[in-house]
Image (cartoon, rainbow, N blue to C red):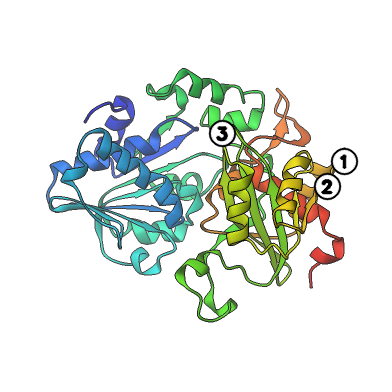
Amino acid sequence: MLDYNEELYNANNSGQRYVIHQGGTGSGKTYSIMQYLVDYCFHHENAVVSVVSKTLPHLQRGAMRDLKRILADNGWSANVKVTKTDFCYRFGTSVIEFFPADDEAKLRGARRDILFINECNTVDYESFTQLDVRTRKYTLLDFNPVRRFWVHDELIPSLNDADYLFVKSTYKNNPFLTEAEKSNIERRRHNANWWKVYGEGEIGSAEGQVFTNWEIVQPQPSLFKANLTDAELKTYLPGSILGYGVDFGYSHSPTAIVQVNEFNGELYAHEWFYKTGVQNDRLISFVIKNIDVRKPAVADSASPQNIDYLRRNGWYWLSPASKGADSVEFGINLLLERKINVTSVSLNLIKELQQYMWETDENGKSTGRPVKESDHAIDAIRYLITYLPLKRVNSS
């Protein structure tokens, strides 16, 4: 195996029944686990490895992407057969399969030799149990410790010391990070709770996270109109549309567009667009093709020239957001009053909700303000909700 983190690789190869990786951002824990799994399959016959996370899109942009990079970087892609329909990678007689934890058939299906649950804090304990009891040899888990959950409160207390290896890692354990990547992490050390979780890999306080009133939802065909295509099912939201929120970015910050619906008093959000470096002509082309421009839309008022361009080119109902001294806190409070359901393919919005925290001072005391970092899709929702008349977002 070329260019691997020896410390983390040896932990994965320790032979312990459970290897538990608690770590901060940039620690390389997921990548090192995937390196170990590839190496294991190349050196064992008839091995079955399952890689699981909350949703399939998360796997595709996380662990599966890491696997493809490992194979490409080492010149091994030609040695592996890929079955795209069931997301299986075959290494001779051994296989690495990817599937989401919400796939009931797979959850309670065939047995495996090795199980890896990526970001296991997003998977419930019952799902873990169903997967783990069908695993013959090893179970590997990784997560960012945003708060305590079943690994700390259920799993570890049930194990003997000889049953598991607990590994805590941070960006300092990753020898492959560039200085620029390290600096980008360290510039956030002023926020005590964020730094504790993502910088030091320690368990954060639940009260430090702004939004806990949300969950990832899968399509429920009984709620939807009939005869939807597979593509429509991924994005279709129940209830009535409240509109679209838009946050502009360019070089370093993405432009985000999020649709918000209301159903049975709850909000449903879908991320339509989240990209950097997008010119207005490309943006309006996407909007005209994918967005219902007849519905209300509210955008960041700090970019009036962008709003003007989009309005002149067809997005007639796009309006500037209302901003004031307390508009951020006001919008957050409105959102905290509602349950927010997020489509499983809205990966950037999900990541923002997971990482959006209250700002704290050097003593860990909350300042009452959110950390304005990685909040573009959240801001898009906030612009819409605070702009609409309150009667539009009252529960029916």
Distance (Cα) linking label 1 and label 3: 31 Å
SS at mark 3 in the image:
helix
Q: Which residue is mark 2?
A: 330
**Which circle's residue, 3 or 2, is located before the other in the chain?**
3
Q: Which mark is residue 324?
A: 1
Q: Quadrant of the N terminus?
A: top left
Q: Is residue 395 above or below residue 203?
A: below
Describe residue 168's horizontal placement relative to residue 340 as left or right. Answer: left
Distance (Cα) linking label 3 and label 2: 27 Å
Q: Which residue is mark 3?
A: 197
**Which circle's residue, 1 or 2, is located before the other in the chain?**
1
**Which circle's residue, 1 or 3, is located before the other in the chain?**
3
| Outermost top residue | 179
Where residue 295 appears, as percent x and y from the top left, is: 73, 64
Q: Residue at x 44, y 63 (%)?
A: 102
Where residue 6 appears, as percent x and y from the top left, is: 29, 25
**Dot 1 and dot 2 residues touching (CB under 8 Å):** yes
